[in-house]
Amino acid sequence: MKTLRLILGDQLNHRHSWYRNDHKDTLYFIAEMRQETDYARHHIQKLVAFFEAMQAFARWLESRGKRVIHYPLDHPHNTQRLEQNIRNLIRKHGIGRFEYQLPDEYRLEQQLRQLSEDLDIECEAVDSEHFLTTRTELAEYFQGKKTLLMESFYRQLRRKHKILMTGDGKPEGGQWNYDQSNRKKWRGQPAVPRGVGFRKDVRATLERITAAGVATVGDIDPLHFNWPSTRADCLKLLRHFCRQLLVHFGDYQDAMDPGEDFLFHSRLSFALNSKLLHPGEVIEAVLAHWRAHKRQIHISQVEGFVRQILGWREYMRGVYWREMPGYANCNRLRNRRLLPDFYWTGHTRMNCLHHAIRNSLEHAYAHHIQRLMITGNFALLTQVHPDQVDAWYLGIYTDAVQWVQLPNTRGMSQFADGGLVATKPYVSSGSYIHKMSNYCEDCHYRVTEKTGDSACPFNSLYWNFLAEKRAHFQGNPRMAMMLSLLDKMDPRELGALKSRAQQIIRNPDSF
């Protein structure tokens, strides 16, 4: 029986059991399609990275003697729709069985499930063999509990997978979490090592996207493309992180600097989210390097990284599958405003936003604190509709696929789920930005001023947000102190802050 196996663009798992268990009549199908380029306005580097990686994966399969059908965007038989492409291939090749790996996005899950029900041949969905948890593991773990506390889920996974654990079931180093050690401001030292440069020529892929008229955002250097597109590239990036960056990663993982686009971050998120690397092998490589260099690398550097991969990444996926499809419509704070135009240009006098957005437009990248406490913070304080924020985050980052982007945006960044993911809204005045970054020194605005034309916009926006949304936070113990300070504020001072904030909210592109 001829079998058709579908490989989606984020299922480039070289170690999947499929490739050890097939026969001469197995056909593998991988395709660039307008249905995937057009559901959001993507960064051009994101599209190029996925298309380059898909091409490389198809070539790898062919090098192993597999029969591969690869449809570039301009292939004459490419209908640009997943269902129709598959139906046409089934008819053309006399396929008797269709198989696919479980997608990680709800819309594709629904699309493929419906297709399988409609086809009159055998169909089977198999696991993607990538994650360290099942889709339903988080839901099962928190069944009957009032809150979805990430820390408890993270500890459970540490125990389950015996990661950073002693033989008697205790955390290595005596602590579960070194987050308090992961909040240092970077002041120019230690020096940031030179990054890995791939410098690929991607003109052919870029021309294919441009010729199709796909609407994109952001910049690209097609002669020096710097995202990994093969497993060898990704392993090189992983080795570089272990050897050069891990030693200081934990200390400065929350730090921000206008002259450093990546600091000590690994840039492995695309490699993981495309499945070119497995989270287990990434964690194993980091732990192995640490164990061989314990005198130079403190456990806090390692635990901070493991927490992102084993803890937060798996947690986000679990929340996504527990809450979808309704989660995509959450807007508990009832925010309604439009995203400022400068999110698409970086043209603002607010230095922190200018640099975080510039980095996003130039590199299709920003690390988690730039996303959470700069771009996300401003969007929440100015009460932008979560749909608008979702569309921006989903489109602009190379690593953005909905299963991880949506709960991070709706839950962690915008508090649109009312506190399901985050126990408090992640908002701040300019003081936090000044504490964790070097943005404020050269800013047009003064971080120490609250009102007036030269005052940092984050300061008035912060107190205005607390005043306007306080009903949502009444009874939240983590907000009690700030609400108490709000209640004690002189009414004239609060009035001045709210007046300044309304100017910014009504005309954000003027600041």
Image (spheres, grey):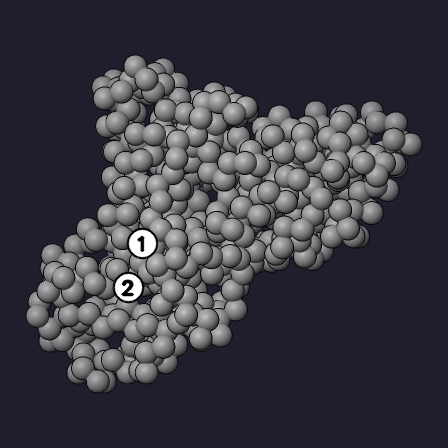
Q: Nearer the viewer, residue 414 or 290?
A: 290
Q: Residue at x 32, y 17 (%)?
A: 296
Nearest to N terminus: mark 1 or mark 2: 2
Looking at the picture, which amino acid does disc 1 mark?
Ser
Check contact, mark 1 vs mark 2: CB within 8 A: yes
Q: Is residue 179 visible?
A: no
Label 2: how many residues lie within 10 Å, few (<14), some (14-19) or many (20+)?
many
Residue with the mark numbered 1: 229
Q: Residue at x 28, y 50 (%)?
A: 276
- The answer to which image quadrant residue 462 occupies is top right
Q: Residue at x 30, y 73 (%)?
A: 71
Q: Nearer the viewer, residue 341 or 149?
A: 341
User: In the shown orientation, is residue 445 left or right of residue 192?
Assistant: right
Residue 144, percent across and down? Answer: 45, 40
Residue 474, percent across and down? Answer: 71, 35
User: In the shown orientation, is residue 179 left or right of residue 6?
Assistant: right
3D distance between C-alphas at marks 1 and 2: 9 Å
Q: What element does badge 2 sit on?
A: helix
